[in-house]
Amino acid sequence: MTTEVEFDVTGAVATVTLNRPDRLNTLSIPMVDRLVDVLAEAAASSARVVVLAGAGRTFCAGADQAEMFERDAQEWERVVRRYLDPVRAIVAMDKPVIAALHGDTVGGGLGLAMACDLRIAADGIRLGSPFTPIGLAGCDMSAGWFLPRLVGLGAASELMLTGRLVTAEEALQLGLVHRVVPRDDFADEVRRWSEQLAAGAPVAHAWTKRAIHRSLGVDMDGEFEFEIFAQVQCLQTADHREGVAAFQQRRRPEFTGE
């Protein structure tokens, strides 16, 4: 039986698929609940890398408009807070997460994508945070945190205040995505990136990801202290010894996560 969020592990790669194509993978509250559970499953799995994808022709068109009925302030706060839980889960996961953006990525969909560590886009798609055109704050679903850090204050201000959508090519120029590839090559490129990361050292990836996100909220000296701590942990691993040996022997390392 299919569900609104599918989960699969093939080898060392886990794939989490938003599976509501008839609704452009818009996020209903039950779907958000399911996504949080699936992300927890992915984090606990044997996979070394996670791919977040969407079924059908769109990655995610944001929140489900059917959920936008009248509520009191307390109920709205609960809903808006819940929609941020998948973002928190992606950031907290000690594994690289790749957003595979094969179709339009807007609103809450962009929030999910920005939470991921790497973003690959198929050509011809659009990305944006179109909240202000419908009378909502442009900082919704983590955009207020991620957009200024990814594209700079000026570009983020324009995108959030106007709600303008950008092409994949402009998103690449802004730094919002890492790669733009032709649609015919998209699946192969996602596979190549995921397999490359899956072959890496899991402990090193975990500490690197923690350091990246921690650095956004601390001063330089605080980040330096964390870097020292993280590197000392990695220096004691079997993966580090294997990496050095492989480099000296001019072969590919075989990391075990130990």
Image (cartoon, rainbow, N blue to C red):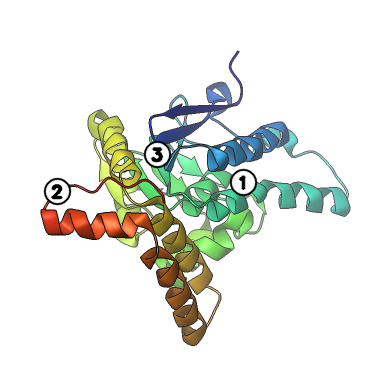
Residues 195 and 189: in front is 195
Residue furthest top as drawn: 1
How crowded pointer 2 is (Cα within 10 Å; few <14, some 14-19, many 20+) is rated as few
Find disc 1 in the rendering and name its residue: 86
Disc 2 residue type (three-letter): Arg
* Residue shown at the point (35%, 42%) measured from the top left: 198
Whole-number angstrom distance, CA of label 3 to CA of label 1: 16 Å
* Residue shown at the point (40%, 56%) measured from the top left: 205
Find disc 3 in the rendering and name its residue: 100
How crowded pointer 1 is (Cα within 10 Å; few <14, some 14-19, many 20+) is rated as many
Find disc 2 in the rendering and name its residue: 251
Quarter-of-image position of residue 99: top left
Disc 1 residue type (three-letter): Pro
Quarter-of-image position of residue 33: top right
Quick one: SS at disc 1? Answer: helix
Q: Are the residues flagged by discs 2 and 1 in contact, CB closer than 8 Å? A: no
How crowded pointer 3 is (Cα within 10 Å; few <14, some 14-19, many 20+) is rated as many
Quick one: SS at disc 3? Answer: strand
Residues 157 and 142: in front is 142
Label 3 or label 2, whichever comes before in sequence order: 3
Compared to 127, does 184 lie above or below?
above
* Residue shown at the point (23%, 49%) measured from the top left: 253
Q: Quadrant of the image for the N terminus? A: top right
Compared to 66, does 212 lie above or below?
below
* Residue shown at the point (30%, 31%) measured from the top left: 187
Which circle, 2 or 1, is nearer the viewer? 2
- Percent coordinates x, y for residue 245 in the rendering: 20, 57
Image mark for residue 55:
none
